[in-house]
Image (spheres, rainbow, N blue to C red):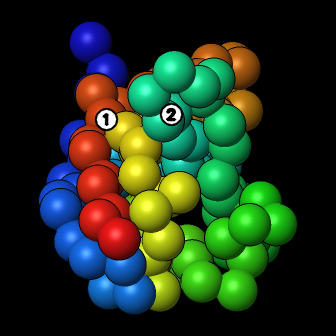
Amino acid sequence: HVQLVESGGGLVQAGASLRLSCATPVRIFSRSAIGWFRQAPGKEREWVATITKGGMTNYRDSVKSRFTISRDNAKNTVYLQMNNLKPEDTAVYYCYADQTSPYLKTYWGQGTQVTVSS
């Protein structure tokens, strides 16, 4: 059973920063684009950011100037640095890995709660 392990969530005030981590099994990390979704109460899950195997990044517009996704190949870990957090960023954040070889498969983490108070 493949498991992505997220950490770093918490309760912060608006304007603060948090860094989420997603630890990924070695055999998955090197074969996958990895990113984050989030789901707020009563809302559908929405994509936040992705980093490809080659390090290219992409973000949803609402976080583009505030969040930075990066990957540490030595630690098989992806990070989401979140700055200037807003109450609307409150959600459960899920890490995912889109494996492309030897077959297509998406893996998910269990989620980590981020709560931003105003």
Give the label, 2 or 1, closer to the camera: 2
Looking at the rendering, in which quadrant would you find the N terminus?
Answer: top left
Q: Is residue 55 left or right of residue 84?
A: right
Residue type, label 1: Gly
**Mark 2 or 1, nearer chain start:** 2
- Percent position (x, y) of residue 78? 42, 63
Q: Are marks 2 and 1 in contact (CB under 8 Å)?
A: yes
Residue 115 higher or lower than 2, as above or below: below
Q: Is residue 61 left or right of residue 70?
A: right
Residue type, label 2: Gln
Q: Can residue 15 be seen here?
A: yes
Q: Is residue 111 left or right of residue 100?
A: left
Bin the neighbour count of mark 2 within 10 Å (Cα to Cα): few under 14, some 14-19, many 20 and up. Answer: some
The residue that label 1 is drawn on is 111
Q: Residue at x 71, y 20 (%)?
A: 104
Q: Nearer the viewer, residue 74 or 55?
A: 55
The residue that label 2 is drawn on is 39
